[in-house]
Image (tube, grey):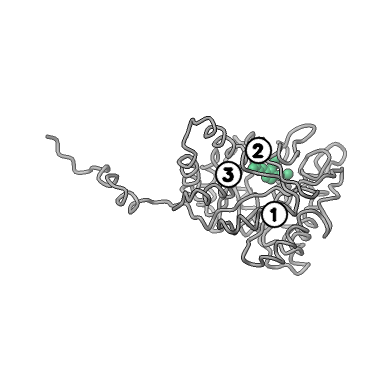
């Protein structure tokens, strides 16, 4: 009989042993649930491409939050879906704009018991569907910055804990930080979408927000998925510009980038488990091709193992409902 010194399988024999030696756990406290808030009243429509996720008018959104808080959700990310879109993204700014108004109501009700973050970008507000303003047929980086900064400030004034610029314009973190400091909001967290790739995985989200660019694509501002070193230089810039949390997006096809971020900064690293990643799991589970719980836990554990401290995920409500994290 052959004698082996090393038998890695010893540590895989029972549940208790496996738990004892497990290197990674999904940190429930690091999970953030995204929401889509639209204009109107009494609206709650399931997003066809994202089963279990809804676009809701503010009244219905407040009801959802009330029931989700009972489930244990206490960190959220809000996306606005305005009725009106135009060339200047006029509905993206102003104290009475859609998302700041909803945030004000949430904060009046829940205060610090609910961590509220919101996406800062123009694509849901421009008639072009692009993330920046168009001047002379080009996405004009510098003309977009003041609008983003004003949008972020309106959110901060409404009580938003954290703004998440997802537009990928150059210099936006610095401009937002300056504007927040100058206007007496030194404590607003900036969670920068630092390495945001031009990705096919955003398909269901754009369906949810009707934010597909009418013409062209986002490759002039979102990153090329062939590039890895470039993510490190984006990371460096956002750290210098004043980001508090840095994000990689999408998550599952970009685990190497998450691991690079983990090595290259001491800041908290977030990863966005995006709509297409969610829908893949949902579609396969509906067809009974996979065990949904096992696949969700495997995906989120892998994102954590790569180095993410925070994960934005549409699966959070199902995780809590199902008691999947024990
Ligand atoms: C807006 C934005 C997008 C997502 C988050 N913020 C879409 C895009 O850039 O086209 C994607 C989120 C998801 O797919 O879940 N800039
Ligand atoms: Zn955008």
Badge 2 residue CB within 8 Å of ligand 1: yes
The residue at the point 75 percent across, 54 percent down is 59
Mark 3 / mark 1, whichever is N-terminal: 1
Compute the Cα span from label 3 to label 1: 16 Å
The residue at the point 72 percent across, 37 percent down is 218
Q: List x then y, in percent, for residue 184.
A: 75, 69
The residue at the point 49 percent across, 50 percent down is 307
Eyeballing the image, is 235 above or below 282? below
Eyeballing the image, is 137 above or below 149? above
Q: Image quarter for residue 85? A: top right
- Name the residue at the bottom extreme: 184
Answer left or right for 176 relative to 293.
right
Residue indicated by mark 2: 202
Badge 2 vs badge 1, beta-carbon distance below 8 Å: no
Q: Secondary structure at mark 3?
A: strand
Question: Which quadrant of the figure shows ligand 2?
Answer: top right
Q: List x then y, in percent, for residue 51.
A: 62, 39
Nearest to the observer: residue 46 or residue 244: 46
Badge 3 residue CB within 8 Å of ligand 1: yes
Badge 3 vs badge 1, beta-carbon distance below 8 Å: no
Compute the Cα span from label 2 to label 1: 17 Å
Mark 3 / mark 2, whichever is N-terminal: 2
Q: List x then y, in percent, for residue 41.
A: 79, 50
Compute the Cα span from label 3 to label 2: 10 Å
Residue indicated by mark 1: 118
Q: Secondary structure at mark 2?
A: helix
Residue indicated by mark 3: 273
Q: Secondary structure at mark 1?
A: strand
- Name the residue at the front extreme: 42
Question: The N terminus is located in which quarter?
Answer: top left
Mark 2 / mark 1, whichever is N-terminal: 1
């Amino acid at each position: 009989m052959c004698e082996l010194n090393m038998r890695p399988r010893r540590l895989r024999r029972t549940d208790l042993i496996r738990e004892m030696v497990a290197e990674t756990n999904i940190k429930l406290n690091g999970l953030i649930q995204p929401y889509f808030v639209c204009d109107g009243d009494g609206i709650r429509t399931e997003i066809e491409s994202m089963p279990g996720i809804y676009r809701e008018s503010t009244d219905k959104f407040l009801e959802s939050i009330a029931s989700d808080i009972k489930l244990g959700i206490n960190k959220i990310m809000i996306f606005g879906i305005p009725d009106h879109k135009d060339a200047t993204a006029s509905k993206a700014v102003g104290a009475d704009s859609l998302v700041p108004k909803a945030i004000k109501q949430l904060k009046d009700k829940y205060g610090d018991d609910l961590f509220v973050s919101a996406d800062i970008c123009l694509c849901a507000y421009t008639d072009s569907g692009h993330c920046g303003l168009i001047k002379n047929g080009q996405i004009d980086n510098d003309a977009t910055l003041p609008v983003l900064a004003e949008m972020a400030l309106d959110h901060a004034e409404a009580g938003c804990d954290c703004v998440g610029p997802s537009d990928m314009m150059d210099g936006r973190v610095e401009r937002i930080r300056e504007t927040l400091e100058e206007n007496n909001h030194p404590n607003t967290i900036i969670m920068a979408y630092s390495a945001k790739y031009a990705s096919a995985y955003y398909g269901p989200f754009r369906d949810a927000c009707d934010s597909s660019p009418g013409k062209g694509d986002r490759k002039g501002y979102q990153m090329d998925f062939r590039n890895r070193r470039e993510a490190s230089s984006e990371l460096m810039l956002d750290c210098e510009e004043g980001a508090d949390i840095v994000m990689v997006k999408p998550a599952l096809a970009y685990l190497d980038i998450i691991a690079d971020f983990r090595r290259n900064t001491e800041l908290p690293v977030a990863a966005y488990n995006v709509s297409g990643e969610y829908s893949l799991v949902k579609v396969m589970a509906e067809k009974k091709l996979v065990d949904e719980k096992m696949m969700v836990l495997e995906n989120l554990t892998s994102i954590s193992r790569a180095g993410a401290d925070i994960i934005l995920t549409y699966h959070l409500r199902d995780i809590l409902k199902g008691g999947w994290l024990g």
